[in-house]
Image (cartoon, rainbow, N blue to C red):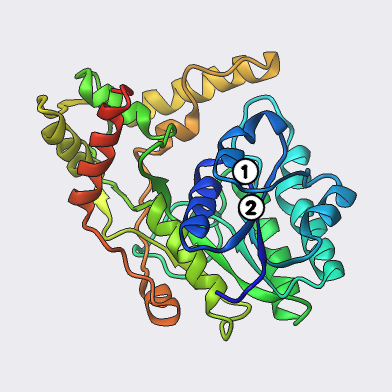
Amino acid sequence: MKEGVYLVTGASGFIGSNVVRLLVDRGVRVRAMVRDPRKSADLEKLGVPVVIADLRDASSLSRAVEGARGVFHIASLFRRAGLPESVFHDVNAEGVRRLFDAAIGAGVERLVHCSTVGVLGHIENPPATEDSPYNPGDMYQRSKLSGEKIALEYLRSGRMKGVVIRPTMVYGPGDTRNLKMFRMVARRCWFYVGDGETKVHFVDVRELARAFLLAMEKEERNGEVYLVVGPKAVSQKVMADRIASELGVPRPWLHLPVKPMQWLGSLCEAICMPLKIPPPIYRRRVDFFTKHREFSGEKAARDLGFRPAKTFEEEIVEITRWYREHGWI
């Protein structure tokens, strides 16, 4: 990468912190943007300058990007109960516009924007490619789609150079989102909704961080969208069985019917959401068992030179080992 300072938004998050660490390991000058100053301690231990800014505050973004050569835009508002769709749109869509405007005003040369495969929703004819039709399924995915479209408007108009990255489902050492699955398998209480044969496609967060750096380095690539995927898509049953094997516990066997669980999830949300209480079961979590998530990484391999370095089986071994060593399972 060329000399200069590179800003990472969402630097205290799972993906952002891994991008920061990789940049530090490569000897790149990094500036970390966080919204909550209480989450800056780990970044400061790395010797990384931290700037406090908010995607809803244009003036704070102008301060964040000042003097930066490139920006990795990873920050977003993820799914959170009790918030109206307008809040997600303000952060995940209009926040993208504010950041691009601030970056252009500061003379930033390149911006790599993090979207999500969620903008494609359920994949009718897997594997999906970058040309598959948009099909967002909830307010988070709709807001991310709006943000992606805004980013592409800037990039394809020539106002800013850069690309859009769409990661598949992200896991890896330190991941809290998918920790529940590992714990449930470890405790022998994991169950399937349906037959467990729908496929999921993960990418290791450390590999994803490397893809972001490649996207920043490949300056000849502009206005493109890239799916960043792991070694292969696997069925939920294959994944649970592999985790069980690594943990030395019996393979999960319980299967629950789809429709009653979907009804239960919708009912829980209808009752809990108006009261701003996190539902014990979300409809989208039930739908996780019914939607295909399989993607092609051919374009990223061809244009960016990104190919996963390890197999799916090796990744599960490393993640499980990390959870055990840190007492998480």
Quadrant assignment, res 247: top left
Asked if residue 219 is positioned above or below residue 95 in the image, the reply reads below
Mark number, residue 144:
2
Asked if residue 71 is positioned above or below residue 143 in the image, the reply reads below
The CA span between labels 1 and 2 is 6 Å
Q: How many marks?
A: 2
Give the left or right position of residue 186, taking residue 90 as reference: left
Which residue is at a point 37% across and 69% down the rendered structure image? 297
SS under mark 2: helix
Mark number, residue 317:
none
Asked if residue 52 is positioned above or below residue 234 in the image, the reply reads above
- The quarter of the rendered structure image containing the C terminus is top left
Where residue 19 appears, x then y in whole percent? 51, 54
Where residue 130 appears, x then y in whole percent? 48, 70
Give the left or right position of residue 58, taking residue 219 as reference: right
Q: Nearer the viewer, residue 4 or 177?
A: 4
Which residue is at a point 61% across and 53% down the rendered structure image? 74
Where residue 190 appears, x then y in whole percent? 25, 24
Q: Which residue is mark 1?
A: 140
Residue flagged by tag 1: what amino acid is it? Tyr
Q: Nearer the viewer, residue 153 or 114?
A: 114
Give the left or right position of residue 226, taking residue 108 as reference: left
Quadrant assignment, res 134: bottom right
Which residue is at a point 68% across and 71% down the rendered structure image? 152
Asked if residue 52 is positioned above or below residue 63 in the image, the reply reads above
Residue furthest bottom as drawn: 220
Which residue is at a point 84% across and 64% down the rendered structure image? 101
Residue flagged by tag 2: what amino acid is it? Lys
